[in-house]
């Protein structure tokens, strides 16, 4: 009887260990070949971020003796922050406004702030802008009051970024008739005449918006007035005045607000791994840009420019910057 009890206890213990191990990634995942196995949260396949991440993973796998990387599709910034907090990925892309919101325990993270986030590298600038049909009479946010506006999927980075911008402007979702569609679904709805505007918080170009522009609906891009920009930036220091000078073909420069798209990790990522990732980014930057033009601004100098904010640089990043003479 005792033997049976001991056997049952052993089975229960092993089963519990399996369950626990399946809930989170180990703090240091090392493959049989001795390389650190890096799981990278990207975005939907339509975005610049997905192209950036997949190209970077290829670069790592081609040139690192200590790290191998793979990418997964996600909803983007917000989901990646949650996956990082749950220790289910090792790195993930996020706008600094979304990561800051999570660390402050605001919006989707109210009452449960995320701690321990680190920036490993700057990727590229991100922007807040509004897409409307080419023949739309709307010229400002005020013109969209009560209109059918897509704010982004709840739980996604576009939604979280837009809510932060609207809050800084003194508005909320009820100012519009809000919709919470994926970007591809929102574009289809706009083409069908079911939406008046689509909000974007992210990269300066997106393949779904390019499809909208190429359709009979066409595209006009709206930013913010000088007064609105001043109000937004005064109320949210993670946002800065920016000029979106190069976006969609034929679209003139747009005055708006924005921040930085970064790739993030947590304090659990080993120092030597984040150091290696920064080395690969720097030493093979030209090859990276050849593979994707979105990597042009992914430089150590731009990463160093992120110091002093709410989210610290990872220790491996700071170490690498010191080694190449950038403080």
Image (tube, rainbow, N blue to C red):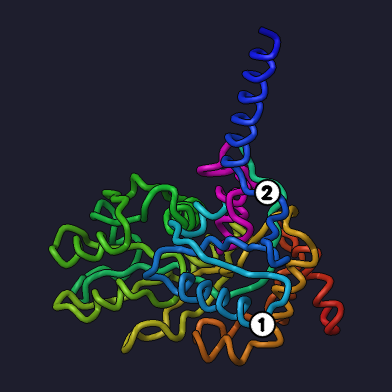
Q: Please tell me in which quadrant of the rendered image residue 200 appears.
A: bottom left
Position of residue 170 measured from the top left corner of the image (x, y, whole percent) = 47, 51
Q: Nearer the viewer, residue 127 or 145?
A: 127
Q: Helix or strand or loop: what does disc 2 sit on?
A: loop
Depth check: give the residue in front, 67 or 307: 67
Please give the label number shown on residue 26: 2
Label 1 CA crowd tier, 10 Å (few <14, some 14–19, many 20+): few
Give residue 4's quadrant in the image: top right
Residue at point 60%, 60% (across, down): 234
Image mark count: 2
**Residue 73 versus residue 243: which sits nearer the camera?**
73
Q: CA distance from mark 1 to mark 2?
A: 24 Å
Seen in the picture, residue 297 relative to 2 is either above or below; the reply is below
Query: Residue 178: where, in percent of width, then height?
Result: 30, 49
Q: Residue at x 21, y 81 (%)?
A: 214
Q: Would residue 151 be visible to someone looking at this image?
A: yes
Residue 235 in view in this figure:
no
Secondary structure beneath dot 1 equals helix
Residue 82 higher or lower than 206, as above or below: above
Judging by the rendered image, the residue that carries numbered circle 1 is 63
Q: Earlier in the sequence, mark 1 or mark 2?
A: 2
In this view, the residue in front, 51 or 206, is 51
Q: Which residues are magenta?
A: 82-111
Picture quarter containing residue 285? bottom right
Q: Is residue 145 magenta?
A: no
């Amino acid at each position: 009887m005792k033997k049976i009890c001991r056997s049952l206890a052993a089975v229960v213990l092993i089963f519990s260990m399996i369950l626990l191990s399946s809930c989170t990634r180990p703090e240091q995942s090392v493959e049989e070949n001795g390389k650190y196995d890096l799981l990278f949260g990207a975005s939907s396949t339509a975005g610049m971020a997905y192209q950036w991440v997949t190209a970077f993973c290829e670069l790592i796998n081609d040139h690192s003796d200590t790290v191998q990387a793979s990418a997964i599709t996600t909803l983007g910034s917000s989901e990646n922050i949650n996956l990082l907090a749950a220790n289910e990925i090792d790195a993930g892309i996020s706008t600094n406004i979304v990561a800051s919101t999570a660390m402050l325990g605001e919006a989707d993270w109210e009452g449960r702030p995320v701690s321990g986030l680190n920036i490993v590298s700057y990727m590229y600038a991100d922007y807040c802008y509004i897409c409307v049909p080419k023949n739309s009479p709307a010229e400002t946010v005020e013109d969209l009051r009560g209109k059918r506006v897509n704010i982004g999927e709840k739980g996604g980075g576009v939604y979280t970024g837009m809510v932060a911008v609207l809050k800084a402007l003194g508005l909320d979702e009820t100012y519009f008739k809000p919709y919470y569609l994926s970007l591809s679904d929102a574009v289809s709805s706009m083409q069908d005449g079911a939406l008046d505007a689509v909000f974007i918080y992210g990269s300066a170009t997106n393949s779904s918006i390019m499809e909208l522009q190429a359709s009979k609906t066409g595209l006009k891009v709206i930013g913010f007035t000088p007064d609105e920009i001043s109000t937004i930036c005064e109320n949210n220091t993670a946002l800065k005045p920016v000029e979106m000078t190069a976006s969609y073909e034929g679209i003139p420069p747009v005055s708006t607000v924005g921040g930085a798209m970064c790739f993030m990790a947590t304090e659990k990522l080993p120092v030597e791994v984040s150091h290696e990732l920064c080395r690969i980014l720097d030493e093979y930057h030209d090859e990276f840009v050849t593979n994707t033009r979105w990597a042009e601004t992914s430089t150590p100098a731009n990463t160093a420019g992120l110091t002093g904010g709410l989210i610290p640089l990872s220790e491996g990043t700071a170490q690498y910057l010191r080694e190449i003479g950038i403080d």
